[in-house]
């Protein structure tokens, strides 16, 4: 006997409640009360904010009586129509989690209070193996107004899952369960691997006391949330050029950065300040970026935990799990995120800093080949004037004559997705070079002073 993975629907698999969408579809098909049930919209708004309540569940339980005499086939057609819109509000990182369980050969089961005939089409689209849901009794092609089995909620959901598990040879102690609701605690505590997803306040408290993992499927793994907000929402308020008086920013046009959907932003690396410049660029384009960063950043006190909380992806090239960052970045792209990569990996030091030909590592090209996400080149110039390689801190005192940072975004790079990614990497680097000012593309011999500024503190200059 092996385990299965059980997913709740509302506020877990979905970003919100399915009720409003299903109610609208039923109304459009002439299968719901005219004008809806009194107080229904208020209950749905409360549900989105705080999760399940006894009144909302009483309304769900009473829906069986309201369905009396309705055509089963007509309701199933409504479920198919509602699946179109429900699929649009599936949490972006839910797909990757479902795929993980599928790859582990675990049955994937939707366990929900929502009537079976209304959610089965969505479950089929998402690749679920089965559905454990409230079923309405039927006779002669219509509903009788009664339930067939449990009302699949709280202890009723646990009973239904136990029966399904027994029939399918599933061991609950080896199973996984995901839910947002305090009322699903019976099921969560019955499985070996419970997870509180976007938990309501009471479930969050219990999860903290019992050390049940808390996750959110609308943000990258490891990113915490407080209500609807994640850490980057707070950072976004401070990510404004006018709040950085020791630098000026010349962005140019950012129209090539997609307004939504996945994108890989690639830029040259001149300074520790590049991260700030790229963050400002993404936010100005209306996106919340996820960075691939060296392990040293994530290992640093204060900055490291903050980088992880903002959805940063730790890169440790010397480890046995060197491919994991690309998998995490691919997961973010599959969820429609923007991922920022510095293909050079590290800031060139010494005389190499002034080489007009940029050399890149193949990670960005391999990531593009994995996901087919567009690669948008960004040319950065002047960040080293704010934070030279030789300095441990940026120059925040230059308020009278702050240097100007030039940021230019180009169109998507045309890639061949070659097997070794070397040729595509060069295409990416060439596209970045084309966005830099003319002086960046001219070969020159740097002075000893310039080489010193381009060399890390306490490191011997390479001339």
Image (spheres, helix red, strand yellow):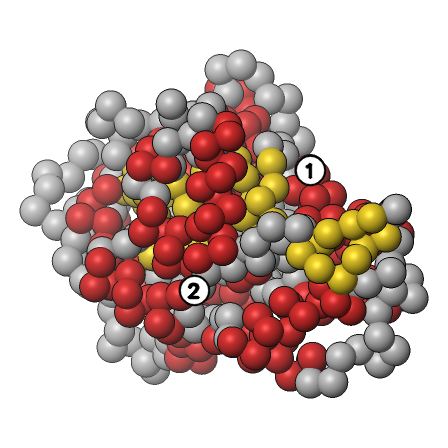
Residue occupying the point 41% across, 46% down? 177
Label 2 close to label 1 by CB (< 8 Å): no
Disc 1 designates what residue? 124
Q: Secondary structure at mark 1?
A: helix
- Say which quadrant the N terminus sits in: top left
Residue occupying the point 86% across, 52% down? 142
Q: Is residue 445 visible?
A: no
Q: Position of 149 compared to 212: left or right?
A: right
Label 2 vs 1, first from the N-terminus? 1
Q: Position of 293 compared to 113: left or right?
A: left
Rendering coords of residue 217 (x, y %)? 47, 53
Which quarter of the figure has residue 269? top left
Rendering coords of residue 356 (x, y %)? 44, 36
Rendering coords of residue 325 (x, y %)? 37, 36
Which mark, by number, is residue 183?
Answer: 2
Badge 1 density bin: few <14, some 14–19, many ≥20, Cα 10 Å: some
């Amino acid at each position: 006997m092996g385990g299965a993975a059980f997913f709740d629907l509302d506020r877990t698999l979905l970003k919100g409640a399915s009720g409003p969408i299903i109610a609208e579809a039923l109304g459009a098909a002439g299968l719901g009360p005219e004008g809806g049930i009194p107080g229904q919209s208020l209950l749905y708004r409360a549900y989105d904010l705080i999760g399940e309540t006894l009144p909302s569940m009483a309304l769900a339980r009473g829906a069986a009586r309201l369905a009396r005499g309705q055509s089963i086939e007509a309701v199933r057609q409504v479920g198919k129509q509602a699946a179109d819109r429900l699929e649009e509000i599936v949490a972006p990182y839910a797909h990757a989690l479902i795929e993980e369980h599928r790859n582990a050969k675990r049955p994937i089961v939707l366990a929900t209070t929502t009537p079976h005939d209304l959610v089965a089409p969505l479950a089929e689209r998402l690749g679920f193996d089965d559905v454990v849901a409230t079923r309405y009794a039927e006779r002669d092609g219509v509903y009788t107004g009664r339930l067939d089995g449990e009302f699949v909620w709280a202890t009723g959901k646990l009973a239904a899952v136990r029966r399904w598990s027994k029939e399918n040879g599933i061991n609950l102690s080896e199973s996984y369960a995901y839910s947002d609701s305090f009322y699903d605690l019976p099921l969560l505590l019955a499985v070996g691997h419970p997870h509180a997803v976007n938990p309501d306040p009471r479930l969050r408290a219990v999860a903290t006391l019992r050390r049940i993992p808390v996750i959110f499927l609308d943000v990258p793994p490891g990113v915490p949330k407080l209500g609807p907000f994640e850490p980057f929402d707070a950072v976004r308020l401070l990510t404004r050029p006018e709040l950085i008086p020791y630098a000026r920013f010349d962005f140019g046009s950012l129209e090539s950065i997609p307004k939504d959907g996945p994108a890989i932003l690639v830029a040259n690396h001149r300074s520790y300040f590049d991260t700030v410049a790229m963050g400002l660029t993404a936010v100005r384009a209306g996106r919340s970026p996820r960075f691939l960063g060296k392990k040293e950043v994530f290992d640093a006190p204060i900055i490291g935990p903050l980088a992880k909380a903002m959805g940063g992806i730790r890169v440790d090239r010397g480890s046995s799990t060197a491919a994991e960052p690309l998998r995490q970045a691919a997961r973010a792209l599959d969820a429609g995120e923007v991922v920022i990569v510095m293909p050079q990996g590290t800031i060139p030091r010494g005389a190499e800093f002034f080489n007009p030909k940029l050399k890149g590592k193949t990670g960005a090209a391999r990531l593009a080949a994995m996901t087919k996400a567009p690669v948008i080149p960004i040319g950065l110039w002047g960040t080293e004037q704010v934070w030279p390689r030789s300095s441990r801190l940026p120059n925040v005192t230059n308020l009278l004559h702050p240097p100007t940072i030039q940021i230019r975004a180009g169109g998507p790079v045309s890639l061949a997705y070659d097997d070794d990614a070397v040729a595509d990497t060069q295409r990416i680097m060439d596209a970045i070079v084309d966005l830099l000012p003319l002086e960046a593309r001219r070969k020159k011999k740097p002075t000893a002073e310039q080489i010193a500024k381009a060399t890390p503190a306490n490191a011997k200059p390479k001339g």
